[in-house]
Image (spheres, rainbow, N blue to C red):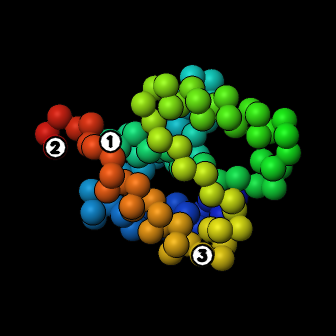
């Protein structure tokens, strides 16, 4: 994992007591998702600078559309946001989680 991924993983683990469980590097239809909350169908992707290149942006768009068709919400954050504002990133993730319905049968 990259340093930003390690930092975000630590932040996501702090959400466990609130009932939000994340997995990292989960395979999905030929892709690996950085972080996934299966219960809320939320995907978190961290993007390095190469994600600003046209080819990579196109690739990311195709991937995000595939995930959206499968019912997932994708949140993308630049690595720099995690390095400089981890609390803000976590706050944004929590806000998204609060809006997404649980897919658990016991919820």
Which mark, by number, is residue 71? Answer: none
Which mark, by number, is residue 85? Answer: 3
Q: Disc 1 to disc 2, how far (Cα)?
A: 10 Å
Q: In the image, residue 90 lies at what x, y percent?
A: 47, 67
In terms of depth relative to the viewer, which is nearer, 57 or 80? 57
* Residue at image coords 80%, 39%: 56
64 displayed left or right of 23 = right
In the displayed structure, 51 sits above or below 61; it is below
| Residue on which the image places disc 2 | 107
Residue contact at pointers 3 and 1, CB within 8 angstroms: no
Q: Disc 3 to disc 2, how far (Cα)?
A: 32 Å
Is any atom of residue 101 visible in this view? yes
11 displayed left or right of 25 = left
In the displayed structure, 93 sits above or below 29; it is below
36 displayed left or right of 98 = right
Q: Which of the two labelled residues, at mark 3 and mark 1, occupies the earlier sequence position?
A: 1
Q: Which structural element holds mark 1?
A: loop
In the displayed structure, 5 sits above or below 81; it is above
| Residue on which the image places disc 1 | 39
Q: In the image, residue 30 lies at what x, y percent?
A: 62, 24
Q: Disc 3 to disc 1, how far (Cα)?
A: 26 Å
* Residue at image coords 53%, 31%: 67
- How many marks are shown on the rendered structure? 3
Q: Which of the two labelled residues, at mark 3 and mark 2, occupies the earlier sequence position?
A: 3
């Amino acid at each position: 994992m990259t340093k930003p991924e390690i930092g975000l993983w630590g932040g996501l683990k702090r959400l466990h007591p609130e009932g939000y469980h994340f997995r990292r590097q989960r395979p999905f239809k030929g892709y690996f998702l950085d972080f996934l909350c299966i219960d809320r169908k939320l995907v978190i992707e961290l993007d390095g600078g190469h994600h600003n290149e046209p080819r990579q942006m196109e690739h990311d768009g195709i991937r995000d559309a595939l995930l959206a068709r499968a019912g997932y919400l994708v949140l993308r954050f630049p690595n720099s946001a995690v390095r400089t504002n981890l609390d803000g990133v976590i706050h944004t993730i929590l806000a998204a989680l609060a809006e997404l319905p649980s897919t658990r049968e016991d919820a």
